[in-house]
Image (cartoon, coloured by chain):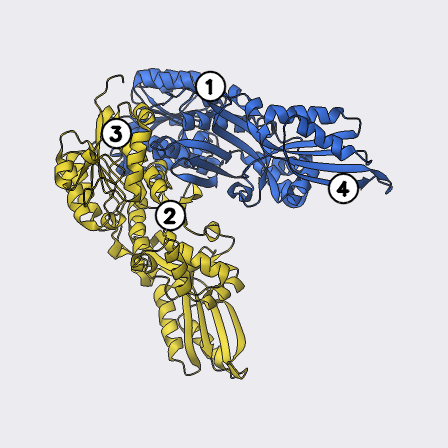
Chain colours: A yellow, B blue
Amino acid sequence: MGNEKPIGVAVLGLGNVGSEVVRIIEDSAVDLAARIGAPLELRGVAVRRVADDRGVPAALLTDNVEELVSRDDVDIVVELMGPVEPARKAILSALEQGKSVVTANKALLAQSTGELAQAAERAHVDLYFEAAVAGAIPVIRPLTQSLAGDSVLRVAGIVNGTTNYILSEMASTGADYSSALADASALGYAEADPTADVEGYDAAAKAAILASIAFHTRVTADDVYREGITKVTPADFEAAKALGCTIKLLSICERITTADGQQRVSARVYPALVPLTHPLATVNGAFNAVVVEAEAAGRLMFYGQGAGGAPTASSVMGDVVMAARNRVQGGRGPRESKYAQLPIAPMGVIPTRYYVSMTVNDRPGVLASVADEFGKREVSIAEVRQEGITDEDGVPAGARIVVVTHRATDAALSETVSALADLDAVQSVNSVLRLEGTAE
Amino acid sequence: MGNEKPIGVAVLGLGNVGSEVVRIIEDSAVDLAARIGAPLELRGVAVRRVADDRGVPAALLTDNVEELVSRDDVDIVVELMGPVEPARKAILSALEQGKSVVTANKALLAQSTGELAQAAERAHVDLYFEAAVAGAIPVIRPLTQSLAGDSVLRVAGIVNGTTNYILSEMASTGADYSSALADASALGYAEADPTADVEGYDAAAKAAILASIAFHTRVTADDVYREGITKVTPADFEAAKALGCTIKLLSICERITTADGQQRVSARVYPALVPLTHPLATVNGAFNAVVVEAEAAGRLMFYGQGAGGAPTASSVMGDVVMAARNRVQGGRGPRESKYAQLPIAPMGVIPTRYYVSMTVNDRPGVLASVADEFGKREVSIAEVRQEGITDEDGVPAGARIVVVTHRATDAALSETVSALADLDAVQSVNSVLRLEGTAE
């Protein structure tokens, strides 16, 4: 150690996370140097508009990303700019110039993972992205390293804090979706345009990253089946409660063997009923959790803060220290492992369980004809509840039937639901949600 | 890649974990080779007595540890023999001969971590031990790598499955310690001689390892304050329940600033009251969990199976794959980081909260004199309960007083308890337990 050459860091972006990263690099300089074996030095921070009220010495600020990335004394580039472009261009440029890169850009990773990994491979440098999934929670490193000798079967996580806050609110207060979203916005948990969160795009990008790593297969966001939470109703939460469940937006990555004997990867995001006894059921508010099931390890759970400046900066800095150590020692961390390249399973072949809620005419034979539509498609029914309902004046207005099925292919279930909607006796199919985290 | 030279592995010990490690090396050969970049080849397995009914080809078995370790075609030695000796000798010999070592031997690590780390350092090889703490749960790697850019404040874990099984039984069935221990033995959760588990030695070894890593300081098992669970009674569980708590054996590692302004490391193991709302309260049976609190990351929790052949083998194999990759790539994983070398804080200066249960004479002024003993030592009382008790014939037999204190130094609390025992009005001090996981 002693007089090791410093490791130069460039930070791109000075939002919540970037500011915390800069703070840690400066405040923890002595500790970081001891852990790395060389001092970590901040070379510059790229911002959209240089101003002197950013809490960073003006001399360090620049609006010229390319120039900062290209500096000879920059060894590690930390990309925290956000959108796919210009982040992609900046990262590729950094990698091509032999800089190690740390990024939290899940949208970019879920789209261009192959391109970025290959650029890192060619340049023999590290590309780390622990912060891209589940904020402060170590998930990428446990999957790529700790479980490197095991065989991952399934990863199921709550990886979007905004939707988890909204669903937790709906569960605990009985609020409807719109007012829970309004609360989330007021508290800063939802962005002005919440689409990426509530429609599941963010969760899908993270599912793609998790599936890629867990199954050594390149999975992009386009490969992920996706449903958002905008259609979840208070009635769904009531029905869930009656079934001993709550509702969570899950990102699920699974290795399955399809009917043809082929191993495939399934990656999917949807709101699902989860039994209250399942570890993910108790993850509330803006917290994240990821459950990993592996052949030898069994079930593991990782829990913590999934977003926010400081927690995300913790993950980023872990990656920075590892990349810096590797540069000091002349080595490199584990590279992308995509040897398996399993095909992606289409949603239709995935075995899931369904919860279906419908309003029917209350007359003899209706339940039988409903049950018949399930039976014809070999969808086995696990549980049925029927209760009479009345209109606002207390006049009988038919019945509500809730059906919970055993596991069947998503295609068979979805055909059954279409057929139910076409039955004369069925006034409306009110909700269709999947049920996860149960035995069969 | 292509025709990379194979990586040779020697396994020392063929118990539950060793057998699973051998099975994974053989059954997952293709996957492991793809992940490592070279085939992993089992060179031999050291056993105490060679026999042909061990599920391993007899040609691979040997009772000569030293000869196996010294083979030129062995690159990685996996030590799963158990006791401190001869494991220490075998590991030192392997390291000195330039082999990377993977071990799950917590007792050895908690005693000889410095000696082993220095030997690995001299030989420029990896010494990995993820499986030594909390079985399948990745804890060592997240602490050394994912949190390498953060500042760990506290690690608190349930890291001994035997005692957690016993305490969970006592909590749920009201059983006393002896019968819960008998159940644990019958189910194979406790060993014939359960001392290492029930007296907290195993948890203390793991606390030493966790504290060493979390605080970049060499901590041995002797530095860990230790109390076992043998004195915990059903009455304690009743009192805990009344306080909204349960009782868990905790391994706690903390960085504290003592009165003299010096940063110190505290490592301690004892049964403690934990609020039912704390994430560790719901960790039951043979499961393990570790909660890490870091400055930027906030609170993280890692949960999973803490023991058993397959789960522990998963951790061991993660280390084997990482060590093998490093050999293929000509690098090395992160080395021991002990730059901080903080002094160990004696238990007396540690601020804790106490729960004290005592039987007193039921007459005026007793509560005042009890309270006075706390007040004299500046121990602030948070909660008091007093109730009359009767003997077997229903005759009044005094009162039970339960006191819960605010945080005070352990020395002050322990002096207070001694003074209480000396009071004429106090018939007996029945229980003294610490309270953890609360705000103040």
Q: Chain of mark 1?
A: B
CA–CA distance in space, label 1 to label 2: 44 Å
Image disc number at residue A153: 2
Q: Is tag 2's residue or tag 3's residue first in the polypeptide sequence?
A: 2
Name the one closer to the observer, A133 or B359. B359
Name the one closer to the observer, A73 or A143. A73
For discs 3 and 4, the disc positioned in front in the rendered view: 4
What is the quadrant of residue B38 in the picture?
top left
Q: Position of residue B208 (x, y in %)?
A: 48, 25
Q: Chain of mark 2?
A: A
For discs 2 and 4, the disc positioned in front in the rendered view: 4
Residue B399 appears left or right of A168: right
Q: Chain of mark 4?
A: B
Task: Residue under label 4, please give it.
Answer: B387
Q: Is tag 1's residue or tag 4's residue first in the polypeptide sequence?
A: 1
CA–CA distance in space, label 2 to label 3: 33 Å
CA–CA distance in space, label 1 to label 4: 44 Å
Q: Position of residue B25 (x, y in %)?
A: 35, 35
CA–CA distance in space, label 3 to label 4: 62 Å
Task: Residue under label 1, please give it.
Answer: B343
* Kind of element beneath mark 4: strand
Q: Label 1 sits on what residue type?
A: Pro
Name the one closer to the observer, A233 or A176. A176
Q: Is residue B280 above or below residue B217?
A: below
